[in-house]
């Protein structure tokens, strides 16, 4: 039996009401927690992609993927390991403007961390950083003791390394079935 | 074309129709003739609309929505059409859930139409508002809420397409009251394609070739036939395959009648209470050819010890079933009939006499140790198997048979000799007690020319007993046989075998069932003694009227053989070692 690890599911769907509910039922039935979930329209109008991260053994993830594919409105589910995709998450940090200044150089940190300032307001500064979880986590650890007011991180978005475009996948799918 | 003629002959010449009337017209365009339903506030416009179409469609009123849906399930199975159910919002709709779950797991095509509160009340906890789409999502193949009359034609046609294609299943369409009442232009077009729904996989010839190679190499192949064989109407091809390569065929509960039980290659039923030979020899086979079945745990027993010396070929239309429970060596995804027609020419003529002989020997063991005594008991008390056997002999396979859930169900599956496709209906995957009585009514609607025989326990009978009224009102030719052991027999059997006879809440104090049936207007009788069997069965089948028979059977009879729960199929017991 393989060890549980992170898998990213790219679920290609129609824009149907209730799909999210239906997809999440597949996970809850097997008592699996979704680590992160993002949905957006793809480059093809009307076709959406859910990016779902789950930590589980491969066999289970494969079965989950097949059950999701069975849902009417789902075209295809791609399952990837972290190595097979480029992925990013975006994190926002809200810092109090009167942070404790003893040796703390915010500008330098932002530069070193490849973060950027989104806006500077009267009483707070909004910082953004994009990266993997461990990277946004690192900045969180640095800012935390110096007056961090709020922190939020998005779900993962991912792009698969293999080159085939989505249209081609959909065309292939079409060829695999009769109507 | 069809639309045109319908519009012309319509009593309402206007093309603008109410949503409710559009529902009825679309159903008629989809070929619906029978509807099972129960009215209520939120579906009243539809009930008002159907009133004008009763010369084209027949509506049956069971006494509970669960009764309606189980009747529709049996109707669908026997007629091969999609069953149609109406229910109102809230409690009407939630009463359908058991039936939806049952139809989902047994792959039965249904279109259920539920009324819903008006769209402006949605989400406000209005009177009889339930989130039916949310509640039914895990137990439907597809569901959808209609909030505008303009959607009705396409959505209902889509519902029929989805319910009946690929692996069939139940669909629920929830229609708000305002959508039923507002006007729409009636424009019907049959849906024959749905985005992101792929019901018919093209068969990969490579996989068929690989399967043929395994079959040609096999010394001890065994075919497991499931319901998929029947759903794709592949029965004749299955006989061809079995005869050409001389392969024994075993059937799942829902696969019964997929292969003629009189055929010399038929080796019996699989599963916990199936036949001895196919269970024991599953673990001797070197090749399992599973066709249109899903390796239910009641079939496999302990999966880690299932068919260990065999390679597995799995022919299945639902891709998500592949490798779900048993790892396959060759998977052929596709419709069973299509796959078999491609496979048979690649399969060589073979003889497996010695292998088939092994089945015959074990069959004999089962006969000697179980079957002979079961159908011809030497003890005074009446036994389930003997009643079932006698009715089987009496009807010669010409009756449609329904079994509820429990010991009598397994006995029916074991001892009734089925002759025709789709002449046995039961609740398989869900094991829904209470399925039987309403199902027997639905079966009779689908098959008015044949008697329907229902075998039901005293427990399950009381779960949907109100449907006696439906059977009586419609004078349905249903012969109800209650095998009364005053126990929840199947549970009691487990308590006896695995809980040291601690009979916790499995005894039943029952009323006089014949009085109840009589009060509903059914001819009713009680069978107490063996010498009266013939006479009573003659009376039962003397005419086409419904008949109620209560049989007082031995209280603590057990179903054997049995694969104990979570044990390997090869550990099947012929009797208990009390
Ligand atoms: C709705 C429902 N509730 C409970 C069960 C669990 N169950 C399975 S068999 C059985 C006993 C059935 O008793 P009866 O109807 O008298 O039939 P018998 O087994 O005695 O033939 C029970 C309670 C079930 N299958 N369905």
Image (cartoon, grey):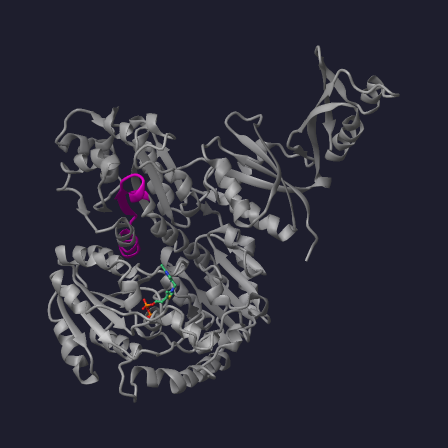
Q: Is residue B398 visible?
A: no
Q: Is residue A59 visible?
A: yes
Residue A125 appears left or right of B234: right
State which quadrant residue A127 falls in: top right
Q: Is residue B374 covered in magenta?
A: no
- Residue at x-position 69% and y-position 30%: A89
Q: Position of residue A13 (x, y in %)?
A: 52, 34
Q: Position of residue B80 (x, y in %)?
A: 29, 53
Q: Determine the residue located farthest toward the right in the rendered image.
A: A103
- Above/below status of A50 relative to B261: above
Residue closer to the observer: B548 or B369: B548
Which residues fall within the magenta stretch? B72-93
Residue A153 appears left or right of B558: right
- Above/below status of B246 relative to B344: below
Q: Is residue B91 covered in magenta?
A: yes
State which quadrant residue B489 falls in: bottom left
- Above/below status of B523 relative to B64: below
Residue closer to the observer: B313 or B66: B66
Q: Which quadrant is the N terminus of chain B positioned in?
A: top left
């Amino acid at each position: 039996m393989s060890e549980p690890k992170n898998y990213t599911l790219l679920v290609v769907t129609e824009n149907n009401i209730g799909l999210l509910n239906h997809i999440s039922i597949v996970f809850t039935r097997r008592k699996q927690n979704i680590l992160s979930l993002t949905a957006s329209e793809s480059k093809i109008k009307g076709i959406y992609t859910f990016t779902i991260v789950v930590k589980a053994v491969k066999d289970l993830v494969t079965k989950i993927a097949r059950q999701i594919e069975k849902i009417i409105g789902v075209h295809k589910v791609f399952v990837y390991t972290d190595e097979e995709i480029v992925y990013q998450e975006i994190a926002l940090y809200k810092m109090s403007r009167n942070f404790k200044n003893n040796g703390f150089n915010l500008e330098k940190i932002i530069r070193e961390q490849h973060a950027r300032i989104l806006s500077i307001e009267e009483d707070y500064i909004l910082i953004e950083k994009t990266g993997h979880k461990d990277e946004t986590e690192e900045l969180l650890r640095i800012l935390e003791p110096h007056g961090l007011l709020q922190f939020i991180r998005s779900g993962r978005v991912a792009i698969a390394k293999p080159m085939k475009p989505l249209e081609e996948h959909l065309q292939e799918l079409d060829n695999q079935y009769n109507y | 074309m069809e639309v045109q003629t319908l519009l012309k002959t319509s009593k309402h010449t206007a093309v603008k129709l109410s949503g409710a009337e559009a529902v009825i017209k679309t159903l008629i365009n989809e070929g619906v003739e029978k509807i099972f339903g129960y009215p209520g506030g939120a579906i009243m416009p539809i009930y008002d609309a159907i009133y004008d179409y009763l010369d084209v469609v027949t509506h049956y009123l069971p006494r509970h929505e669960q009764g309606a849906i189980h009747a529709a399930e049996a109707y669908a199975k026997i007629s091969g059409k999609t069953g149609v159910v109406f229910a109102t919002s809230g409690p009407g709709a939630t009463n359908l859930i058991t039936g939806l779950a049952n139809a989902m797991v047994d792959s039965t095509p249904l279109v259920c139409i539920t009324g819903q509160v008006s769209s402006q009340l949605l989400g406000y906890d209005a009177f009889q508002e339930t989130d039916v789409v949310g509640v039914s999502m895990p137990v439907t193949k597809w569901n959808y809420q209609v909030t505008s009359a303009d959607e009705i034609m396409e959505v209902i046609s889509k519902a029929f397409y989805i319910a009946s294609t690929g692996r069939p299943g139940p669909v629920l369409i929830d229609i708000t009251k305002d959508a039923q009442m507002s006007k729409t232009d009636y424009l019907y077009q049959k849906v024959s394609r749905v985005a992101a729904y792929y019901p018919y996989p093209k068969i990969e010839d490579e996989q068929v070739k690989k399967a043929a190679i395994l079959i040609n190499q096999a010394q001890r192949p065994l075919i497991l036939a499931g319901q998929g064989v029947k759903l794709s109407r592949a029965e004749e091809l299955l006989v061809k395959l079995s005869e050409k390569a001389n392969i024994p065929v075993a059937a799942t509960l829902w696969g019964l009648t997929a292969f003629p039980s009189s055929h010399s290659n038929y080796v019996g039923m699989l599963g916990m209470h199936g036949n001895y030979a196919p269970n024991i020899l599953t673990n001797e086979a070197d090749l399992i050819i599973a066709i249109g079945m899903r390796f239910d745990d009641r079939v496999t027993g302990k999966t880690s010890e299932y068919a260990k010396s065999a390679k597995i070929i799995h022919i299945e239309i639902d891709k998500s079933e592949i490798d779900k429970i048993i790892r396959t060596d060759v998977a052929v995804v596709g419709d069973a009939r299509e796959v078999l027609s491609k496979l048979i020419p690649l399969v060589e003529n073979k003889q497996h006499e010695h292998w088939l002989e092994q089945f015959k020997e074990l069959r004999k063991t089962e006969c000697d140790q179980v079957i002979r005594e079961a159908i011809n008991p030497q003890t005074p008390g009446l036994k389930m198997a003997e009643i079932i056997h006698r009715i089987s002999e009496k009807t010669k396979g010409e009756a449609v048979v329904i079994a509820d859930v429990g010991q009598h169900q397994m006995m029916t599956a074991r001892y009734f000799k089925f002759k025709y496709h789709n002449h046995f209906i039961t609740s398989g995957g869900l094991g829904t007690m209470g399925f039987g009585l309403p199902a027997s009514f639905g079966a009779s609607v689908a098959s008015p020319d044949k008697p329907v025989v229902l075998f039901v326990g005293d427990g399950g009978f009381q779960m949907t007993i109100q449907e006696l009224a439906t059977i009586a009102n419609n004078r349905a030719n249903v012969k109800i046989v209650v095998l009364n052991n005053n126990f929840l027999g199947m549970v009691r059997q487990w308590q006896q075998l695995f809980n040291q006879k601690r009979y916790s809440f499995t005894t039943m104090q029952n009323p006089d069932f014949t009085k109840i049936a009589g009060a509903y207007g059914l001819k009713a009788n009680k069978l107490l003694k063996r010498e009266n069997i013939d006479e009573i069965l003659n009376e039962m089948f003397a005419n086409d009227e419904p008949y109620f028979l209560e049989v007082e059977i031995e209280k603590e009879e057990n179903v054997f053989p049995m694969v104990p729960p979570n044990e390997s199929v090869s550990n099947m017991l012929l009797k208990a070692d009390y």
